[in-house]
Amino acid sequence: MKNLIEPVEKLISEFSRLPSVGRKTAVRFAYYVVNMNKEDAHSFAKSIIEAKEKVHFCGICGNWTDQEICTTCQKGNQKLVCVVAEPKDILALEKVKDFSGTYHVLHGLLSPMDGVGPDDIRIKELLDRISKYDVQEVIMATSPTVEGEATALYIAKLLKPLNVKVTRIAQGVSLGSDLEYVDEVTLSRAIEDRKEL
């Protein structure tokens, strides 16, 4: 765009780096920030810095937390572990109020085409956790995509010799959809109707 002053252009550039934010949306965000009063702008900037400084991975499950161990791992049933690809998937599953277990975040899915193998996601940490906490059941709640299915089957094969019950969320979640967009009724039914792999 012509006639943009450098600080605004820099702000637009930073907003454009966010996922799903195109140039037009970045321009709207930048002008919104410029129009904020000084106190609100400082509060906004402080929130970003504070989140970056205080938020890190839970020492057990790999979810985001501002504590050493997240509240779910502190209070949940460690013998029941629900495996997800990303932290955002936990937010979707938390809509199901009656789940009493804990989670394990892989931080990705197996995808040989993209060069993502078993050592690139948190499978080793899951195996360590199973022996440490005497896990009885692992629910595979990866999205029903090719990568999600491949990851679920790979982990199930690793866990079978360990005498751990491995289940998969039922196909109430439609193939190719992301968990973060699935409604709570569908998710609840999917967890209730899970099946052993």
Image (cartoon, rainbow, N blue to C red):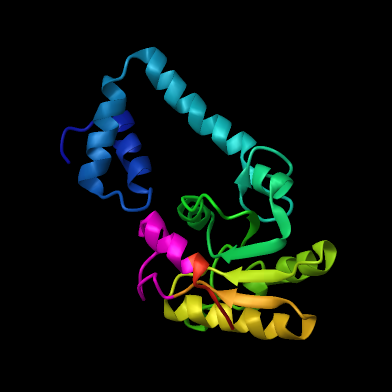
Instruction: Judge left or right: residue 92 versus residue 31.
Output: right
Residue toward you, 96 or 13: 96
Instruction: Judge left or right: residue 27 versus residue 11.
Output: left
Q: Is residue 166 above or below residue 25?
A: below
Instruction: Judge left or right: residue 34 versus residue 60.
Output: left
Asked if residue 179 lies in the magenta stretch, the reply is yes
Residue toward you, 78 or 9: 78
How far from the left and from the top, in percent, is residue 28? Answer: 22, 35
Q: Residue at x 45, y 54 (%)?
A: 92
Q: Residue at x 41, y 13 (%)?
A: 39
Q: Residue at x 77, y 86 (%)?
A: 161
Identify the image quadrant of residue 103. Answer: bottom right
Q: Residue at x 70, y 38 (%)?
A: 67
Residue at the farthest left position: 2
Query: Can see residue 39?
Result: yes
How far from the left and from the top, in percent, is residue 95? Answer: 46, 50
How far from the left and from the top, in percent, is residue 37? Answer: 33, 14
Q: Which residues are magenta?
A: 171-190
The quarter of the image holding the C terminus is bottom right
Identify the image quadrant of residue 137. Answer: bottom right
The quarter of the image holding the N terminus is top left
Q: Is residue 69 above or below residue 92?
A: above
How far from the left and from the top, in percent, is residue 94? Answer: 51, 51
Residue toward you, 140 or 120: 140
Identify the image quadrant of residue 3. Answer: top left
Asked if residue 141 lies in the magenta stretch, the reply is no
Residue toward you, 70 or 171: 171
Query: Can see residue 106?
Result: no
Q: Is residue 18 above or below residue 193?
A: above
Instruction: Judge left or right: residue 108 versus residue 104.
Output: left
Query: Could you tell me how many numbered marks the image carries?
Result: 0
Residue at the farthest right position: 132
